[in-house]
Amino acid sequence: MSASSGPARPGAGQTAGAEGMAAPPPPPRSGRLLAPRGALALGLALVALAFVAGGASGAYPIAPAQLLGALAHAVSGTPPDTPQQLVFLNIRLPRLLLAAAAGAGLALAGALMQGLFRNPLADPGLVGISSGAALAAGLTIVLGPAWFPALPHALGSWTLMLTAFAGGLAVTGFIYRFAQGPAGTHVALMLLAGVAVNALAGAGLGYLNFMATDEQLRNIQFWLLGSLGGARWSAVALVTAVVALCCAAALAWARPLNAIALGEAQAALLGVHVERTKRAAVLITALAVGAITATTGIIGFVGLVAPHWVRLLTGPDHRVVLPCSALLGAALVLAADAVARTVVQPAELPLGVLTAAIGGPMFLWMLRHFRGRV
Amino acid sequence: MHALPPSRRAVLAAALGCATPLALRAQPAPAASATSAAAGLPRLVTVSGAITEVVYALGAEAQLAGTDTTSLYPAAALKTPKVGYLRQLSAEGVLSLRPDAVIATTEAGPPVVLDQLRSAGVKVELVPSEYTWDDVRRKVQAVGHAARREDAARALQARLDAEWAQLGREVAQAAAGRAAPRVLFVLSHGPSAQVGGQGTAGDALIRFAGGVNALTGFTGYRPMTAEALASSAPDFILTTEQGIDALGGPQKFWQRPELALTPAYQRRALIALDALLLMGFGPRLPQAVRALHASLYP
């Protein structure tokens, strides 16, 4: 989250026009490299490829025949009959689905935020969801045992997930309320309030780090680095459902977002409900990223990078950018997690390290080669 | 390689990065049974340096399928497959070693992964650590049971118990009629030193060896200001060899200005022990306490 803002700055400098924060007007249609249908097909192909590659790789050796057998068992509902099938169905498959859902949700939210703020630097962390979730997770880890000893009994292993989700929503809700003015939601104010609240949450986390025992400290650190290691079917089903709903809802707001790209006043003149669009975009982002972050911890950079790549290839139309970003995000996280699971096996790397390590150079390369068009 | 132009270097690095997971995957799967000596006996993954030490003390190392990154002793443990840091285990990674049982301290996690291991039919044994002698007994019992080496475990337990009782008598004898030395436990040496309060491995070890912790009033590890460190007036400073090495030797350590005000400074009373020996609470606990005791009561 914090690592994402640095490398993106040159892009922002490029776009500085009459209005410091606005993205450039949409490039002419000739600037796009892929037709919408081609882009969608390419995105689907990438996701399929990453899913198959991720499914076939892992620390536990599973022969292709066993993979197919496991899938047959899953479809027919019968219990798996070899340990390989058990590992695939109970450990690898839920993880693949969580990777796809997390990548899709984060990239979708990134595209929404960049569209809403008309700012290429925007990422889902900007409106406080990640930092709120991180702060709530830190509070639960450090103060939970002393202050709310009954909480784990009531919520069991869901405790951390639910408190993180609630924390993310609460902080986003606060930032949204804070930015309300006589003329509706003040987007620039929301952005700046987000920066301030992120800093505050960072201070809170720093204090919690100071208070934490050695064990709690490591728990917080690993939470902040993100991991799909906690993928269980119940959580995966929940996150996948939330992300799918959010994707469907986001598509309905693609046209209003296209209008807002021209400026809020112009959008209002075109008959777009600017306020409603803003509220919907923030709500969709909060729900999707809140659910994902609560389950996986913070997975950086995907939400920032994926929409940029898509816009570069397809142009700025949100009807294409939103679904394609989701697809590219899913493929990126699937690929990153496949690497995280296999490079240091039988251990695994924290996923956040990989998404930033892969995403950062990709982003720099993109900025360099498409200087004029980012 | 550094002579190559940057672009080619980038391509090579990328190729290497892509090839690494493939190369790792191409490794043959671990054999179903480690060696003939361990044939038929349960395969173990140990997730704690002290528990790994117990496995070696019982002579059950042929049953060891993997260990965690804190398992650094004996040196042979470094060559076992590593399942990562004890709080961040990977279910598939551990299962790929085909263990029958995973023995860990209660610090191991994440919990979801432990559940996944259990649901895959692996016995997961968690040993609580409270920094008492019972820790060692529990670890020996857990390994003996999981490795099906109960007899060896009982023999080791009896030997360790006798050694511990003897050591307790020696410490009590040496400490009788004398003021117990004040010991400050420094875990790490950042800009402000991380020091150990109550409920830490260092605190327990200091007590066992006949000293008192120079710090009271808080539990766990805390960064400490220079002034508080000076006012704790330790007679000895206990730390890890690894920490002293990272600083560049004892001379560098004593250069910290706040230390000049402590009684320990006059005699340069610094005790550095191996981190795993000091904090492991494994079968070498008597050895650790004996070493510390010998330094406190020369």
Image: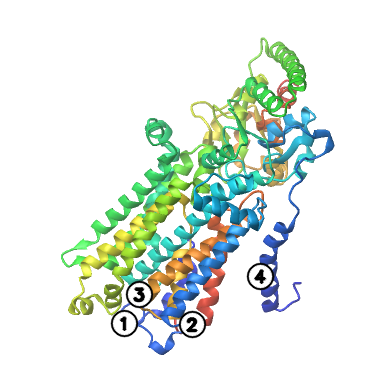
Residue at the disc numbered 4: B14
Residue A81 is situated, as x and y percent measured from the top left of the image, at: 60, 44
Residue at x 62% of width, y 22% of height: B132
Q: Are marks 2 and 4 in contact (CB under 8 Å)?
A: no
Q: In this rendering, which labeled residue sits more in front, label 4 or label 3?
A: 3
Residue at the disc numbered 1: A18
Q: Are marks 4 and 1 on the same chain?
A: no
**Image check: A170 left or right of B245?**
left
Separation (CA) of disc 4 from disc 3 = 33 Å
Q: Are marks 4 and 3 on the same chain?
A: no
Task: Please give the count of numbered marks on the rendered protein.
Answer: 4
Quarter where residue B204 is shown: top right
Residue B108 is situated, as x and y percent measured from the top left of the image, at: 58, 37
Residue at the disc numbered 3: A318
Separation (CA) of disc 3 from disc 2 = 22 Å
Q: Pointer 1 indicates a residue of which chain?
A: A
The amino acid on which the numbered mark 3 sits, given as a three-letter code, is His
Separation (CA) of disc 4 from disc 1 = 40 Å
Q: Are marks 3 and 2 on the same chain?
A: yes
Q: Are marks 2 and 4 on the same chain?
A: no
